[in-house]
């Protein structure tokens, strides 16, 4: 496992990269076959959503947190992702929606979050949402207050773990009646795939670009 301490300056630089190839960074986490490419593209009336990627200093270095969603009738019941949800009329922007949802779901106070920027939006055909990931930083590890109606568990992920290729694995799933090879990140023994894996892959690629690391290379091998 890489023991690289990722400073905040690297994260900030990663979000400012000019001409970063998002699709190339995400490619290792696409399904095979890629069902998204077979789905109709989102139209101008596509539903908009946002998630917050909260980053804070912790024992393992800069860390983010994901949630396992509580069981519900929706298509994302029980899945792992970042706190977030649909834009509501009063939100005005993906940033406002991400901060509101993170407060409702895990108790993060919007005033405690400094927004660093956004990752590329991800289209999720099963739910019809276009989701914008908003990355924000906190001064320290927050006192999480998960809403039990929406959150079954929290999973903390040191950003350095994204540079550990041993955490990237594959499994087979039947999705929409199609047998697929599904790449995923192993986060605390849990399978993180789909749209959330694409977001993490973009973040990983940006960090590697700033650090000058290729996939398969970590601090110990340099």
Image (cartoon, rainbow, N blue to C red):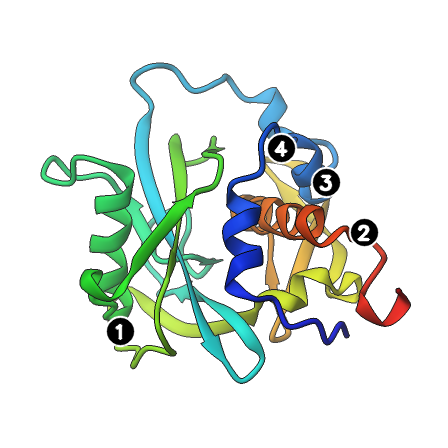
Label 3 or label 4, whichever comes before in sequence order: 4
Label 1 or label 3, whichever comes before in sequence order: 1
Q: Residue furthest bottom?
A: 59
**Marks 2 and 3: which is nearer the front?**
2
Tell me which residue sits at (88%, 64%) in the image. Answer: 222
Q: Which residue is mark 2?
A: 215
Q: Gap between marks 3 and 4, in whole Å?
A: 32 Å
Query: Are dots 1 and 2 in contact, CB under 8 Å?
Result: no
Q: Residues within 10 Å of mark 3 (few under 14, many from 20)?
A: few
- Given residues 8 and 166, the one toward you in this image is 8
Relative placement, left or right, of 118 versus 167 is left
**Marks 3 and 4: which is nearer the front?**
4
- Given residues 130 and 21, the one toward you in this image is 21
In the picture, the disc for residue 179 is 3
Tell me which residue sits at (33%, 43%) in the image. Answer: 50
Q: Gap between marks 1 and 4, in whole Å?
A: 38 Å
Could you tell me which secondary element the residue under label 1 belongs to? Answer: loop
Q: Gap between marks 2 and 3, in whole Å?
A: 27 Å
Q: Residues within 10 Å of mark 1 (few under 14, many from 20)?
A: few
- Image height check: is 111 above or below 176? below
**Percent x, y of residue 16:** 52, 40
**Marks 1 and 4: which is nearer the front?**
4
Label 2 or label 4, whichever comes before in sequence order: 4
Q: Which residue is mark 4?
A: 20
Q: Gap between marks 1 and 2, in whole Å?
A: 37 Å
Q: Residues within 10 Å of mark 4 (few under 14, many from 20)?
A: some
């Amino acid at each position: 496992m890489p023991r690289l301490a990722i400073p905040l300056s690297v994260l900030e630089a990663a979000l400012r990269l000019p001409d970063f190839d998002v699709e190339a960074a995400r490619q290792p986490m696409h399904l095979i076959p890629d069902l998204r490419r077979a789905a109709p593209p989102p139209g101008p009336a596509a539903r908009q959503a946002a998630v917050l990627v909260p980053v804070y200093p912790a024992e393992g270095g800069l860390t983010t947190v994901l949630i396992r969603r509580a069981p519900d009738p929706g298509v994302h019941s029980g899945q792992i992702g970042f706190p977030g949800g649909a834009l509501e009329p009063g939100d005005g922007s993906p940033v406002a929606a991400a901060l509101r949802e993170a407060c409702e779901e895990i108790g993060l106070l919007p005033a405690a979050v400094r927004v660093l920027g956004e990752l590329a939006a991800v289209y999720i055909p099963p739910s019809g949402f276009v989701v914008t990931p908003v990355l924000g930083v906190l001064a320290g590890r927050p006192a999480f207050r998960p809403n039990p109606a929406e959150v079954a568990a929290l999973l903390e992920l040191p950003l350095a773990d994204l540079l550990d290729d041993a955490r990237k694995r594959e499994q087979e799933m039947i999705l929409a009646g199609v047998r697929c090879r599904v790449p995923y990140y192993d986060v605390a023994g849990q399978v993180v795939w789909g749209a959330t894996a694409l977001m993490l892959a973009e973040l990983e690629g940006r960090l590697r670009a700033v650090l000058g690391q290729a996939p398969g290379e970590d601090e110990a091998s340099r």
